[in-house]
Amino acid sequence: MRVQVRYFAALREALGPAEAVELAEGSTLGALRDALLARGGRHAEVLARGRAVRCALDQAMSDESATLRDGAEVAFFPPVTGG
Amino acid sequence: MHRVSIQTADFDLSAEVAALRAGDGGVGAIASFVGTVRDRNDGSAVGGMELEHYPGMTERAIEAMIDEAGRRFDIRAARVVHRIGPLRPGDQIVLVAVASAHRGQAFQACEFLMDYLKTQAPFWKKETTPEGARWVDARVADDAALARWGISAGNA
């Protein structure tokens, strides 16, 4: 299956605004992060475990246990700082 | 009337409040909060900032917060305006306004919405300082503010 990944703020500056990623059916959001980390380079740096990275699934705050479906929109971003 | 606006343009508090209570004779209290850009942050002079958001999700998140405020408090209307793009010290950033029959619920709902927005609405501030541009860090104190309402933020 294919999911759309979007990045915001400092993550967007490092990785670009969006990319499509191929994943095994039934993958979780955490598995997607693992797949991106495995690429090394900037992905491994800014998405590293222990870094403050928040995520959303289909435009709602989510966590890494969420199961993805084909066509899902996942976003990774730093803690929010509006207001 | 729209409950949520994400816009580059400035807003007019008086006009927003007038629209919020127009035609509702049951309104007896309006509470509003306006956030503005400070000229200093974390020990550095701030020359300006750029606000980024997540189009679509940001609006949906704030709509859901207003729905939640309506379940928790006896309010008659609420309005949130948040600016994006380049801003300068002194500029208005955010407006939260709530109309209710009596002041207590209006004050509480306004503070609830602002606490919620600070940690759960996808906005990011990048400020310009003499040392260069930097992304603003989230504050643990903002998570604590939301926790008072019984909601775990997990943002900062």
Image (cartoon, coloured by chain):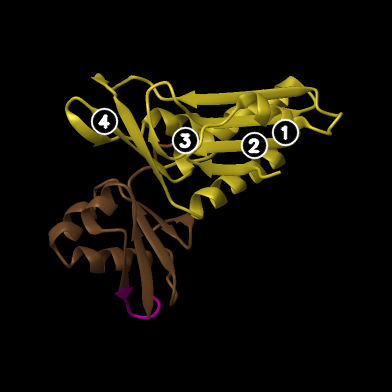
Chain colours: A brown, B yellow
Label whose residue precedes the other's in the sequence (2 or 4):
2
Q: Which mark is residue B128?
A: 4
Q: Cα distance, mark 2 to mark 4?
A: 29 Å
**How many other residues sit within 10 Å of disc 4, few (<14), some (14-19) or many (≥20)?**
some
Q: Which mark is residue B79?
A: 2
Which amino acid, mark 4? Thr
Label whose residue precedes the other's in the sequence (4 or 1):
1
Quarter of the view holding residue A72: bottom left
Instruction: Tell me if label 3 and label 4 are in contact, CB under 8 Å.
Output: no
Q: Does the rendering let one see residue A64?
A: no
Compared across the picture, whether A21 is left or right of B87 comes to left
Name the chain letter of the residue that bears numbered label 4. Answer: B
Which amino acid, mark 3? Lys
Which residue is nearer to you in this view: B71 or A7?
A: A7
Magenta-colored span: A21-26
Compared across the picture, whether B15 is left or right of A78 comes to right
Q: Cα distance, mark 3 to mark 4?
A: 21 Å
Have a look at marks 4 and 1 and say if they share a chain: yes
Label whose residue precedes the other's in the sequence (2 or 1):
1
